Amino acid sequence: MNLKLASEALFALGRRHPGLPFAVVRALPLGVVHALRAPGLRETFRVAARAPYYRDAFAAARVDAGRARRPEDLGGFFLTPDVLKTRPEALLAQRLGRVDRRDGE
């Protein structure tokens, strides 16, 4: 089953029946929901680890972003608001205007 096509079809139906996508997701077993979100989370952790702030913060918190599979794998790590005020550019995973060819854009 192609999950991307299934997701697109479900959300297309959701345009006519707005509550449908959420009802379907709520009906899924929690293990299935976790399995469906895992690839996206792994990719998010991989991309975030390229940003200077996250690279340094993950190292300080002894978080291996390459091995993280669930939010719980990040332990007590969280984004502190001070970085947003003092050095927001440290959150960027790539320079602005540059396209990462691995992302397919």
Image: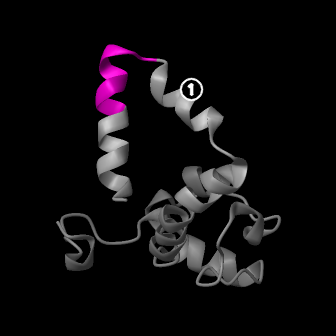
The image quarter in which residue 56 lies = bottom right
Residue shown at the point (17%, 66%) measured from the top left? 105
Q: In which quarter of the image is the N terminus?
A: bottom left
Q: In this rendering, is residue 68 above or below 38? A: below
Residue shown at the point (32%, 25%) measured from the top left? 13
Looking at the rendered structure, the kind of residue marked 1 is: Ala
- Most extreme residue toward the right, as rendered? 76
Residue situated in front as seen by the camera: 101 or 36: 36
Residue shown at the point (67%, 84%) measured from the top left? 64
Residue 75 x %, y %: 81, 68
Residue 42 x %, y %: 53, 71
Q: Main secondary structure of the magenta part?
A: helix
Q: Is residue 12 magenta?
A: yes
Where are the magenta residues, as a range?
11-18
Q: In this rendering, is residue 81 above or below 14? A: below
Residue 32 x %, y %: 62, 54
Residue situated in front as seen by the camera: 59 or 102: 102
**How many numbered marks are there?**
1
The image quarter in which residue 17 lies = top left
Residue under numbered circle 1: 23
Q: Is residue 27 left or right of residue 39?
A: right
Crowding near pointer 1: few (<14 within 10 Å), some, many (20+)?
Answer: few
